[in-house]
Amino acid sequence: MTVFAETERLLLRALTLDDTNSMFELDSDPIVHRYLGNKPVRTKEEVIKYINYIQMQYENYHIGRWAVIEKASGDFVGWSGLKNNFEHEMNGHTNFIDVGYRLIPRYWGKGYATESGIAAVNYGFETMNYDVIYGMTELDHHASRKALEKIGLTYVEDFVFEVEDLPLTWYQITNPYRK
């Protein structure tokens, strides 16, 4: 098992096909997808394709979304981590790194998005030596906006992701180790 990062309460490891049922619980929940374009997955085959995509990110870019495991219980909480966005232009950017997180609702409100997001950003700057990491969330998703700000990202502007006609907010953080 590849562990990318560890925090006081969380273990952040590679997603594997063994996570299919947990990922299906997460991504088939309409509550989770309220601010994600309202497109929950319907089949485990969709989840398997997504896990395979994430594993491609590990292999090609040495980053990706990570399984978030609660140390105290060993429970799968959701995912968090970095992603190389190379498929779509967003807000004038292509081939950029973003931090993201998605948690099962019973784990909301515990600070896990922030805790895992900080670990991911630190990994991006300290291990991968990125210059800048971006974050985005739906305009009205106030909890996610708050998490991005607690992670250390700064609000830049609002924009519309034209592929899905979604109003989003754009955040960024620059590498503090660069001069």
Image: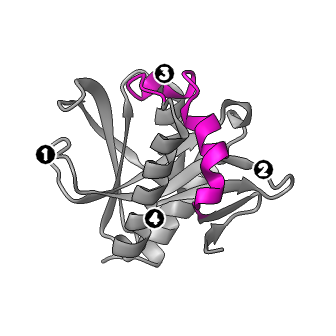
Q: Amino acid at mark 2?
A: Asp
Range covered by the magenta-colored residues? 14-40
Q: Which mark is residue 92?
A: 1
Q: Amino acid at mark 3?
A: Arg
Q: Earlier in the sequence, mark 2 or mark 1?
A: 2
Secondary structure found at label 4: helix
Percent position of residue 121, x then y: 47, 62
Judged from this view, the residue extending furthest toward the left is 92
Q: Quadrant of residue 147?
A: top right
Q: Nearer the viewer, mark 2 or mark 1?
A: 2
Secondary structure found at label 3: helix
Q: Earlier in the sequence, mark 3 or mark 4?
A: 3
Q: Earlier in the sequence, mark 4 or mark 1?
A: 4
Q: Nearer the viewer, mark 2 or mark 4?
A: 4
Measure how far apart labels 2 and 1 are at the Cα level: 38 Å
Q: Nearer the viewer, mark 1 or mark 3?
A: 3
User: Badge 4 is on which residue?
Assistant: 55
Can see residue 60?
A: yes
Can see residue 103?
A: no
User: Badge 2 is on which residue?
Assistant: 75
For disc 3, the neighbor class at 10 Å (few under 14, some 14 to 19, many from 20) is few
Q: Amino acid at mark 1?
A: Gly
Q: Residue at x 58, y 61 (%)?
A: 16
Measure how far apart labels 1 and 3 are at the Cα level: 25 Å
Q: Residue at x 51, y 67 (%)?
A: 122
Q: On screen, 136 above or below 32?
A: below
* In front of the other: 5 or 25: 25
Q: Residue at x 57, y 60 (%)?
A: 15
Tags 2 and 1 touching, CB below 8 Å: no
